[in-house]
Amino acid sequence: MQFIVLFLGIALLLYLIIRIKMNTFVALVLTAFVVALGLGMNPADVATTITKGIGSSMGDLAVVFGFGAMIGRLVSDAGGSYRISETLIGFFGKNRLQLAVVIASFIIGMSMFFEVGLVLLTPIIFAVALEAEIPFLYLGIPMLAALSTTQAFLPPQPAPTAVTLAMGANIGKVLIFGIIAAIPTVIVAGPLFSKLAKRYAPNAFEVKRELPALGEMKKFNLDETPGFGISMLTSLFPVIFMGASTIYQLVVTHGDKAAERHGFNAVMALIGTPTAAMLVSLLFAMWSMGIHQRKNMKEIGNTLNEAIKSVAVLLMIISGGAAFKQVLLDGGVGTAIQHAMSGVSLSPIILAWLIAVILRVALGSAAVASLTAAGLVMPLVTATHADPVMIVLAIGAGSVAASHVNDAGFWMVNEYFELTVKQTLQIWTVLETVLSVVGLAMVLIINAVVN
């Protein structure tokens, strides 16, 4: 019965979002109410469950998401991202432009949302492709692969951070193993896939002289932008803090929670938390990309306000997905899946990936697919004692599979790259699927080595 209600609930959500064009957050909350009643929950408890789901997702996540957007916007508005891209491209030269684009996109993608990274990098990458007289997609595919992979695997990005917190996994371990999984995944889904895509979709690889979707591009004088070193440091500050804390805990305290509460160990544990790492990183960004660039506090404040506006809708959607997830948990769907899968010989990692893929195809949003999958898989993790870090990475890999017409990213790529719908399906949808499958393979390999 629970599965029928779940299927009908997902169908209702799709209908509300795709056909009715209802606001995604409203559709998620409305569907959560309907599914809760369909699962037989006491009507008096439904509102409490939904509030609990929203509240649980807005703790650390609001800080990580909000502060992450602010850091990204500060780096962008100061020209730091432009400096990073131009320096790397200049260093690698035209013969290795794809490698330069991958590194630049990977670095920028670690500190910015996919949408922000795409909007920021597209004009730069297009200008480079134009100068080199090569197809834009030759560089665009590696850029998309790097941006999408960081969104799937790496905190402090919102989806992996939210799933990490929901699963109770160590965020530093997720970051470290996520980077290990992401590097070969980007290489396969980026430079290698671009060669294959050019063979079966040659018309998409024409050399273009202009992209109407770019509109007016913000221009920077390279001499007036922040230095490469300080731009890189600012972009990677959260990653450095959380990574250093995790390595310290693994080497010094060996995961001993009691030891982490005393002396310098406590300080290292503190800076490894998302809230502390992002707060310190934001303060540094306000200095390095603001005050140090001779901006006053009013200008810095305007940048921060614009950043908050850009993430408000995404935060609401994520909280709506968390509400839906909580209803599924409290309504017994997670337990029903656990019972249904108890006789299945699939690895919990593969199962987590498969559930995320199904939700991604059905719902479109990678963030919603991740959060919902986390809620469904959680009982299985407890029952099988699976490594929550590997489950988080598997969910991340599954959440980006097969992007199609119900995904906002599909239409962004369609518009920015001036592709037809058929070409977008041939390039973007296949790219995301390749990324998902290779990402799963890497998680399975890492799990076999460390566990």
Image (cartoon, rainbow, N blue to C red):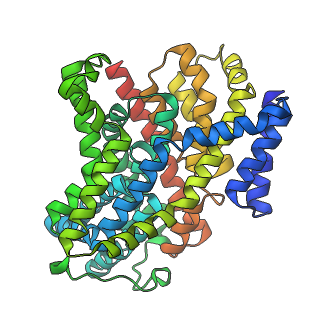
Decide if residue 178 is on the left or right side of residue 357: left
Q: Which residue is drawn at 74% across and 60% down?
A: 18
Q: Residue at x 55, y 47 (%)?
A: 401
Q: Is residue 120 above or below residue 407?
A: below
Numbered disc total: 0
Residue 103 in view: no
The image position of residue 19, as x and y in percent, is 79, 62
Query: Quadrant of residue 353 in the image?
Result: top right
Quadrant the C terminus occupies: top left
Q: Is residue 149 above or below residue 356?
A: below
Query: Quadrant of residue 338 in the image?
Result: top right
148 and 430: which is toward the camera: 148
Q: In this view, does 268 lie above or below 221?
A: above
The image position of residue 221, as x and y in percent, is 21, 83
Decide if residue 311 is on the left or right side of residue 344: left
Quadrant the N terminus occupies: top right
The image position of residue 347, as x and y in percent, is 53, 21
Q: Residue at x 60, y 54 (%)?
A: 316
